[in-house]
Amino acid sequence: MTERLAETSPDTASNAVVEDAAVRAHQPAHGASNTRVIWLLLAATFVVFLNETIMGVAVPHLVDDLGITVTAAQWLTTAFMLTMAVVIPITGFLIQRFPTKPLFVTAMTLFSAGTLLAALAPGFEVLLTARVVQASGTAIMMPLLMTTLMTVVAPSDRGRFMGRVSIVMSVAPAVGPTISGLVLETLSWRYLFWIVLPIALVMLVIGARKVETVNEPRKLRIDLLSVVLSAFGFGGLVYGLSLLGGESGGDSGGATPAWAVWVAVGVGVVGIACFVGRQLLLQREDRALLDLRTFTSRNFTISIGMMVVLMATLFGTLIVLPFYLQRVLLLDPLATGLLLLPGGLVMGLLGPTVGRLFDRFGPTPLLVPASIVLSGVLWWLTTVGETTSVWFVLAAHVVMSIALAFMFTPLFTSALGSVEPRFYSHGSAILGTLQQVAGAVGTALFISVLAVREAAASTAGAGEIAAQAAGIRGAFLVGAILSIGAIVGALFVRKPADMAEGAPIGH
């Protein structure tokens, strides 16, 4: 019996067996059509994730062209994050309520419409609205991809296919800033959207023709109070943390009063507490917007906990490392993007290989060594300074990316494979939501420590660059300490028992 059933009482386990059997009876047969659906979802998700990371490099151009402040320009990223944090918790309901194809078409239509609006935007306000529309479509894609994958892929092949998801998560964010930098060398920022638009439209047309419905929609009634609590909770927390961390490496956060930051965080914490209480009540009647019974699986809980730690560390590092390269080692933005590109590419390209290794050996032989290597790299980064070679930084980033590649796929697969099939959509939504929160936490934590250590070094008489280097070492120290928790967690993640079952899906 699976790990999730072993954790319940005999009566509950008996009921779960019946429920699992009923769900599996309705699942589509594995075959070429289901594989095609997954590939289309992977391609579309890659496009929308690529868009998510292209704006950071464009901030100086937006400031000059639109006549706005840096703080205002950073709202194009903050608003995107906020929309994702608000919409993703609702996707668990949407995936259960509506067929796969209409959801895909809706998501890609929103994304394409937002991209077109952004390319044509006459001013900042319209551009900001366009980013919100884009994010609404983006927020649907990853949970839809993960839920579809869990539904149609045989348990014995999930690691291999989940490894392909890691390509989307790793390569798209890695190449986004580099592509942005190359485009902005010769063209207007509007071409960042004109280049993405035709690709998105092609994905929309192909998906509308080829994507097949692979779920069994149910007539559910949405709980509007849960939606409101979710928006205030996750939106408030991500907003407050983004203000605390500052979207531009600490340059824009100073304009916001401290009380406003803590009010936003407080609203978020209270909202999430009320949201959780509401879901615990509603799930008794199977009406929860985000069903928290996924956490009754110890394997899901441990895997998700590790994902939160890794995401916080990854996002914090992705903010601090470019800051170090540009402010301390004095590289330009394009050189910085090119230096960080190999790590992202390696992480993505290793995904399918790691997935096959997971299918064969399980998570422990992958997670434990990788978590130790990751921790070692982060501890090494606590020694960087003004004279550190860029080649050592490149090597550290590549090794860290390899370690993360050996961790993400096993954790995704172990987490979602440990919940009951009827909770796949909720598990995917929880995963996506906590990714957004973890990213905001990591960014805020790393930048806050950086700012405090930099100020202390300046007070002690250090020069500007030396003080910044001291702040960066402090930020990496946070990541190194967090990584110890990842090593401990890696010892307790188990391969879901049903992943030895099932027939292979077509290639």
Image (cartoon, rainbow, N blue to C red):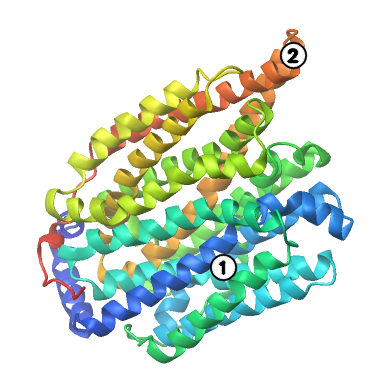
On the picture, is 272 further left or further right than 159? right
Q: Which residue is under mark 2?
A: 463
Task: Please identify the quarter of the rendering in which residue 197 is found.
Answer: bottom right
Q: How many marks?
A: 2
Q: Residue furthest front?
A: 186
Can residue 98 be seen in the rendering of this structure? no
Looking at the image, tell me whether mark 1 or mark 2 is earlier in sequence order.
1
Q: Residue at x 19, y 78 (%)?
A: 24
Vertical side of 80 occupied by 373: above or below: above
The mark lying in front, picked from 1 and 2, is 2
Near mark 2 (Cα within 10 A), the count class, few <14, some 14-19 or many ≥20, is few
**How far across and down, in percent of the image, does residue 462 sit?**
72, 11
On the picture, is 210 further left or further right than 242? left
Inspect the image, locate mark 1, and give the three-letter code of the amino acid beneath it: Val
**How far across and down, in percent of the image, does residue 182 sit?**
63, 54
Which of 47 and 432 lies nearest the eye of the viewer?
47
Task: Please identify the quarter of the rendering in which residue 169 is found.
Answer: bottom left
Q: Residue at x 24, y 35 (%)?
A: 368
Vertical side of 493 occupied by 32: above or below: below
Dot 2 falls on a residue whose secondary structure is loop
Can residue 306 be seen in the rendering of this structure? yes
Q: Which residue is under mark 1?
A: 87
Vertical side of 237 occupied by 335: above or below: above
Q: CA distance from mark 1 to mark 2?
A: 45 Å
Which of 436 and 344 lies nearest the eye of the viewer?
344
Inspect the image, locate mark 2, and give the three-letter code of the amino acid beneath it: Gly
Q: Residue furthest right?
A: 67
Which of 299 and 152 lies nearest the eye of the viewer?
152
Dot 1 falls on a residue whose secondary structure is helix
Q: Residue at x 81, y 47 (%)?
A: 70
